[in-house]
């Protein structure tokens, strides 16, 4: 299944470009890079400067880039949990 705006929260986020648009931890705002790991509560982002940043999902607003023309803004609390947990919690978009 392809990642789309409507089903992104059910998918694994590893490999996607991400921009932290807002976070309760002000030092994480504007972190940009590629998601290299995802845990239940955290995204690990390899920044454009080559540094690994651990960004808590809760408290953030993220913009994920699906293609050159498609980006999706997601509240961090909606992606807390592993992809399979999110699928169960939200009913798979049904």
Image (cartoon, rainbow, N blue to C red):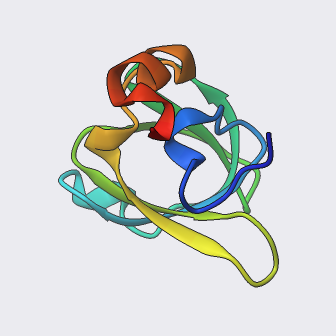
Quadrant of the drawing holding the N terminus: top right
Q: Is residue 59 left or right of residue 48?
A: left
**Front in this rendered view, residue 56 or 4:** 4
Quadrant of the drawing holding the C terminus: top left
- Vertically, is 44 above or below 24? above
Q: Position of residue 49 (x, y in %)?
A: 73, 60
- Residue depicted at x 36% and y 30%: 90
**Front in this rendered view, residue 47 or 15:** 15
- Residue furthest to the bottom: 69
Q: Is residue 30 left or right of residue 29?
A: right
- Residue depicted at x 73% and y 62%: 48
- Residue depicted at x 47% and y 40%: 93
Say how many tags the image has: 0
- Vertically, is 24 above or below 85? below
- Residue furthest to the front: 94
- Vertically, is 85 above or below 74? above
Q: Position of residue 8 (x, y in %)?
A: 58, 48
User: Quadrant of the rendered structure where residue 41 is?
Assistant: top left
- Vertically, is 89 above or below 60? above
- Residue depicted at x 57% and y 48%: 7
Q: Position of residue 24 (x, y in %)?
A: 18, 53
Q: Position of residue 35 (x, y in %)?
A: 67, 43
């Amino acid at each position: 299944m392809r990642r789309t705006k409507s089903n992104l929260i059910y998918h694994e986020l590893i490999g996607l470009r991400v921009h932290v648009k807002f976070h309760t931890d002000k030092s994480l705002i504007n972190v940009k890079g590629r998601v290299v790991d995802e845990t239940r509560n955290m995204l690990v982002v390899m920044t454009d400067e080559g540094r690994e940043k651990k960004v808590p999902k809760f408290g953030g607003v993220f913009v994920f880039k699906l293609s050159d023309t498609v980006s999706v803004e997601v509240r961090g609390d909606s992606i807390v949990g592993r992809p399979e947990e999110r699928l169960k919690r939200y009913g798979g978009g049904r």
